Amino acid sequence: MINAKEFLLQYVEGNDPNKVDVLLQQSEEKTFKFREQIFQEGVKLTSFIIVIKGSLRLSTNVGSQKQYLHTLRSADTIGSIEIVFDSITNYNAHASDENGTKLLFIKATKDSFFIRKLLFTECDLYNPLSVESVDYCVNNLGTKKYSKGSLIVRQGDAGSIYGVICGGVATVCTIKSGELPPFNECTTFDEMSKTVSFKILTKLPVGATFGENSMLPLLDENIEAPKNTNASIFAGNDNDVFILYFDTKNFIKVFKRSESLKKIAVSTDKQRKGRRVKRRMSNALAAAANDIQKKRTLSLISNASDNSTNNNNVDSNNNNNNNNNNNNNNSNNSNYQQEGTIDVITHKKSVVSKRRKKLTVINDYKIHHLLGKGSYGEVRLVEKSSSYYAMKILQKFDNRDRYKLSRRNSSDMVTDVRREIAIMKRLNHENIVKLYEVIDDDNDKFIYLVLEYASGGTLEEKIEKGDLSSKKVWGMFRELVRAVGYLHSQGIVHRDIKPENIMLTDHGHCKISDFGVSRILRHGSHVTVKGTPAFMAPELLLRSKDHHSHWAGALTTQTRVLMDKRHDIISVGVQADIWALGATLYNMRFHKTPFGDATKDTEIEFAERLWHDKLTFPQTEMVNAHLKDLFKRLLMKDYKKRITMSELMIHDYVTDENSHPLFHDEQDLIKYSSIATNVIDP
């Protein structure tokens, strides 16, 4: 339960307690029973709503059904966008606390200072400002709503506003020809796309700003003024866009008064100019890659033509050689390509040396210290020919019953190990730990896996030290995206992505490890739930029997689904890896998991929060608008709406607004963002 007066104090002008008292005099407190409707979709709100106690659930109408969105709890609010921009609600609200939900309704209009200030301060860009500076900004702000697909800024026009997105997502695009676009302010994105050739540069999510390039020269004559805007901005086709803005007059007045605001705008403008230069370089590299690919294709066609001519004039031996070559080419064009896989050595004989009952040598590997230990065995540092490796030592059976761990009704450890070996034999990627050798003697109760050694420890240890910069987090996450994309393209889901299973080289590069619970993608196959709760997607955790309804996840001990519920590995498994990437990124950036500590709650309590709690960010952190948007899409509770790998690889945070694409060759992007299924076991 929150104190309404303390909550409102931070949003009234001058943080004046007397102004809070005036607001409270215009307010009304109401308590709603469990599942009682507060308002429905498509209404205009005349009051700003604060959740004082309990919770309420938001949903949207999909046909005759209600689709769950998320749950609001104490200190959450409703109505800022709807009231300031005079819009109708696009969601329903119901009380969702069995003990009742207490709400505070405050009469408000679009000019209400405290709501405009709340919207302004939700944009993390302005966190460094003093209370006085924020109040001054709010008093000089304009507001505007742009309907779906409508034009916000036209390429070639003189910029006249500095804006920040506070609702919806805008699209930034440029006309490829460089000429002024032949459309006016009434032109929609769809109409523009039918008349000119254009390229989408980036998206502007909530918190993103625009207009720095045009407006900053008004403050400093040393800054060269652009001749015109170099791109157009449209509201997204799927959503209205709401902006707070400064016109030319107010921009000069506010930004000349606040050096902090000017520094923020100058920094953003500098970054964008740098991205434009890198984007041009990236486009040049992509064009070069495409040219090389075309030349290779033409060369293959030419060689094939020459071979066809020669085949008519050679003897039968040469015909056989050509047939073998053609067979090899056909195998390379199969649906599942195993190009670049490692030749893993398998030994059926183990020679073990011991001293005082401790392992000293296994075959030619000298045993060093312990690196890690788990339920199935341990990992040790080993040395061979002055090179270091990590050796995973796993128990197959014990002396009392040599087949104990191999029986059908046992722990299936041997089956899991064999599967892990089969999976790792497929893989050869710079960001995945490599398997070099398997020592599997029928007479030895252990099986030994010789793996690549990453000397930098685990990502979990690095996070705990707290020395990861935002730039380093960005670079590491790009490596993880490439690695997981590669896994999926090879027909494999990892199912336990987390910082503990990500090794680091001595230069800080990421390598995904531990494929003990991984699976091969096949249509129709099902698996039981595996993974670490704090990094597991909500669809894998306990859910109510009516989890598809509006009251999804109303968890009780009577209605829960057991943890061994089986899931389709393709429809759920791939997107669960995506969620785990999001939880890992959140952990890297904020040093905690997104929905609390799973170890401090019961299974039911954590699943309840995972299903219903709204994603939040530390108030002390300035979060990049693109990063915040990516978090919301990675950690989307409905896996069918969650960002896909193909979308993730081109997201503006991952590519830094397309200035650092993951792949310069479009074919590589297509290849590594695809999902291979029905892969044949090696």
Image (tube, helix red, strand yellow):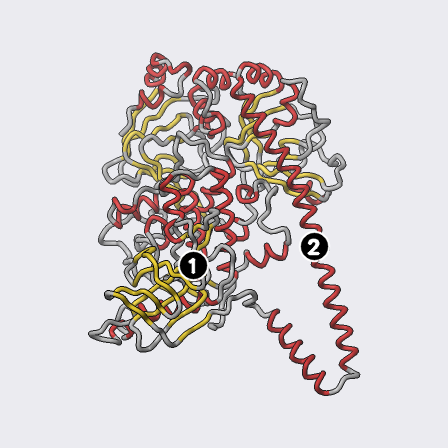
Q: Earlier in the sequence, mark 2 or mark 1?
A: 2
Residue at image mark 2 = 290
Q: Height in image: 332 above or below 26?
A: below
Figure quadrant of residue 151: top right
**Residue 426: horizontal and vertical position, in percent?**
49, 66
- Judge by depth and name the residue closer to the eye, 174 or 434: 434
- The amino acid type found where label 1 is placed reads Tyr
| Quarter placement of the N terminus | top left
Q: In this view, does 109 lie above or below 309?
A: above
Q: Can residue 579 be seen in this view?
A: no
Query: In this rendering, does residue 147 appear at all?
Result: yes
Residue 385 as seen in the image, left or right of residue 410: right
Of tags 2 and 1, the one toward the viewer is: 1
Please give the residue where the numbered disc 1 appears in the rendered image: 388
Q: Are marks 2 and 1 in contact (CB under 8 Å)?
A: no
Indicate the secondary structure of the residue bearing disc 2.
helix
* Amino acid at pointer 2: Asn
Residue 269's x, y, as percent? Answer: 60, 29
